[in-house]
Image: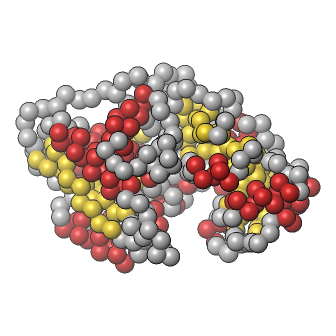
């Protein structure tokens, strides 16, 4: 497993302090339309903030005000799907009809419903929320950050890097998706030299005392609560004198810190954390300031980062386009030219050349970031478990990725 400060190949590379920008050409080559699928309400009708839309609009406005990228200006084609698969399919059809060259998603839940339609329309999805298995193998999905395989592995690697020896995966008993977390975390624990145990528990139990007592008796020093009522878990474990390191993978929610005050927290993210204030994210910070979301009050989340990185990659692909008024085929050919792209240090190096049709490969990112909570705030850390001031990615799951099946050893 390698720790990679991003800047190119290798394990000891300095992140560039300033992003390299291609000079804006005065030649107008046309408008690149980019689809954005997001949800304004969840499955239970709960409102979802418009983070993805606002950061996407800010990104396009900034690029267009600067004259575009490589002669191209950008237009966001937004569709709200409210987490509904049928709405998502219709949204893809409308985005296709609008002439978008690519799309990105602010709602991972709808990707299984639309992935095959993307192939039928030769419409690439560039980044977005990477939480469904399709991101690790589907030929029309172009990842920008880690997918589920590397994200699961990174949680175990983070446990090891903060000194844990026994990874306990306590998963919700009601949902198959919770059980699916067991296999990849067991594989990672075996490869990283950690003891591994798994236990099912009710997702909304009134009391988790028995679960905590069992984990304490097994000397589990890292507790991953997967799909459980986290605040209740921390409360009941504390009552029986059990204080493990709690896993906080996949998000960087300020609410989690509030629910576990005084406890140790560590984990991984699929991409750079929204809390990170290093120079690599300077442009993101300026764009975020144009939205109604803020890091300080916890309203800005990883969704803003994911959408931003997706659009930054679309901009990187646009820099490789050579023709005026490009077609979707032109855009895909430019995407297949991407190799070693870090977006100025914002992501681990990406190589889409391995995903060109006929290669049989998939351009999954095999890297993640690790984070730890110190003095009530999230900080990125390296393999030693020490907080870092410059963005560092940890890489290497030992898995192989192809374009027709889930990752395998």
Q: What residue occupies the far right of the structure in this picture?
A: 217
- List x then y, in percent, for residue 265: 70, 44
Q: Which residue is drawn at 64% across and 72% down?
A: 176
> Does residue 146 show up?
no
Q: Residue at x 55, y 26 (%)?
A: 389
- List x then y, in percent, for residue 217: 92, 55
Please identify the quarter of the rendering in which residue 290 is found: top left
> What quarter of the picture does the N terminus occupy?
top right
Along the horizontal axis of the image, is 8 left or right of 73?
right
Q: What residue occupies the far front of the structure in this picture?
A: 297
- List x then y, in percent, for residue 43: 48, 74
Please identify the quarter of the rendering in which residue 377 is found: top right
Along the horizontal axis of the image, is 147 left or right of 167?
left
Total of numbered circles in the picture? Answer: 0
Q: Which residue is nearer to you in this view: 393 or 400?
A: 393
Q: What residue occupies the far left of the structure in this picture?
A: 27
> Does residue 33 show up?
yes
Q: Which residue is nearer to you in this view: 278 or 309?
A: 278
Q: Which residue is nearer to you in this view: 102 or 77?
A: 77
- List x then y, in percent, for residue 322: 16, 39
Figure coloring: secondary structure
328 relative to 63, above or below: below
Q: Residue at x 23, y 60 (%)?
A: 77
Q: Residue at x 47, y 71 (%)?
A: 46
Along the horizontal axis of the image, is 375 left or right of 141?
right
Q: What residue occupies the far bottom of the structure in this picture?
A: 86
């Amino acid at each position: 497993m390698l720790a990679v400060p991003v800047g190119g190949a290798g394990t000891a590379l300095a992140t560039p302090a300033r992003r390299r920008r291609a000079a804006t050409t005065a030649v107008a080559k046309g408008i690149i339309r980019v689809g954005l699928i997001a949800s304004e309400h969840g499955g239970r009708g709960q409102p979802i903030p418009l983070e993805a839309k606002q950061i996407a609009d800010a990104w396009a406005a900034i690029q267009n005000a600067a004259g575009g990228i490589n002669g191209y200006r950008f237009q966001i084609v937004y569709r709200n799907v409210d987490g509904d698969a049928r709405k998502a399919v219709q949204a893809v059809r409308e985005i296709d009809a609008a002439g978008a060259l690519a799309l990105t998603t602010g709602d991972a839940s709808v990707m299984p419903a639309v992935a095959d339609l993307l192939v039928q329309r030769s419409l690439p999805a560039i980044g977005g929320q990477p939480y469904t298995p399709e991101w690790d193998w589907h030929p029309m999905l172009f990842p920008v950050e880690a997918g589920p395989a590397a994200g699961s592995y990174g949680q175990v690697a983070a446990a090891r890097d903060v000194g844990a020896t026994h990874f306990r995966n306590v998963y919700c008993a009601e949902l198959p998706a919770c059980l699916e977390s067991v296999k990849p975390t067991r594989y990672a624990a075996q490869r990283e030299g950690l003891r591994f145990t798994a236990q099912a528990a009710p997702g909304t139990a009134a009391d988790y005392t028995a679960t905590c007592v069992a984990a304490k008796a097994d000397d589990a020093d890292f507790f991953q609560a997967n799909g459980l009522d986290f605040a209740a878990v921390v409360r009941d474990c504390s009552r029986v004198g059990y204080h493990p390191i709690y896993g906080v993978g996949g998000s960087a929610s300020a609410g989690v810190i509030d629910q576990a005050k005084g406890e140790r927290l560590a984990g991984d993210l699929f991409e750079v954390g929204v809390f990170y204030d290093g120079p690599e994210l300077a442009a993101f910070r300026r764009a975020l300031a144009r939205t109604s979301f803020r890091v300080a009050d916890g309203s800005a989340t990883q969704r803003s980062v994911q959408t931003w990185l997706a659009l930054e990659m679309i901009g990187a692909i646009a820099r490789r386009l050579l023709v005026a008024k490009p077609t979707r085929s032109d855009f895909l050919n430019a995407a297949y030219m991407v190799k070693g792209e870090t977006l100025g240090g914002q992501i681990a190096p990406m190589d889409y050349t391995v995903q060109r049709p006929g290669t049989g490969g998939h351009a999954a990112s095999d890297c993640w970031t690790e984070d730890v909570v110190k003095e009530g705030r999230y900080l990125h850390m390296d393999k030693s478990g020490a907080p870092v001031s410059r963005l560092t990615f940890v890489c290497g799951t030992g898995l192989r990725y192809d374009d027709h099946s889930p990752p395998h050893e």
